[in-house]
Image (tube, rainbow, N blue to C red):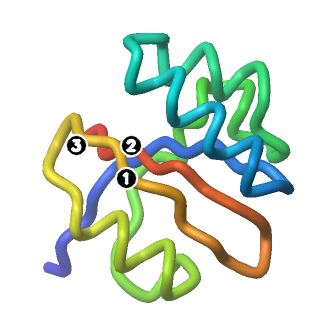
Amino acid sequence: MAEKIRCAHILVEKESTAKEILDRINNGESFSKLAEEFSMDGSRRRGGDLGFFGRGEMVKPFEEAAFGLEKGKVSGIVKTQFGYHIIKRLE
């Protein structure tokens, strides 16, 4: 069976906003609270939780960043056609 991982993300329109949020995460603020406050997609209601997914289900830059993370770690800023993501690997 293909590997599945579980991630949360925060999706914003501007890189400057993403940088600001990443700084706040790095200073100890709650990823899920920031996702609820800032993320542009429906996952915001779940603190950014996207559930489990396998390879080939997400756009390439997002997938590469997500699968490269260790559990509990947060990515840098990942640009896709949807905007700027900050990804946290949950499982």
Callout 3 touching callout 1 (CB < 8 Å): no
Q: Which residue is mark 1?
A: 75
* Residue at disc 2, secondary structure: strand
The tag on residue 91 is 3
Q: Tell me the amino acid under the disc marked 2.
A: Lys
Q: Tell me the amino acid under the disc marked 3.
A: Glu
Q: Residues within 10 Å of mark 2 (few under 14, many from 20)?
A: many
Q: Residues within 10 Å of mark 1 (few under 14, many from 20)?
A: some
Callout 1 touching callout 2 (CB < 8 Å): yes
* Residue at disc 3, secondary structure: loop
Q: Which residue is mark 2?
A: 88
Of labels 1 and 2, earlier in sequence is 1
Which residue is at a point 73% across and 56% down the rendered structure image?
A: 15
Q: CA distance from mark 1 to mark 2?
A: 6 Å
| Residue 88 image-quadrant placement | top left
Q: Is residue 82 above or below residue 72?
A: below
Q: Tell me the amino acid under the disc marked 1.
A: Ser
Q: Residues within 10 Å of mark 3 (few under 14, many from 20)?
A: few
* Residue at disc 1, secondary structure: strand
| Near-viewer residue (20 or 78) | 20
| Residue 65 image-quadrant placement | bottom left
On the image, the x and y values in percent for residue 64 come to 35, 79
Which residue is at a point 18% across and 72% down the rendered structure image?
A: 3
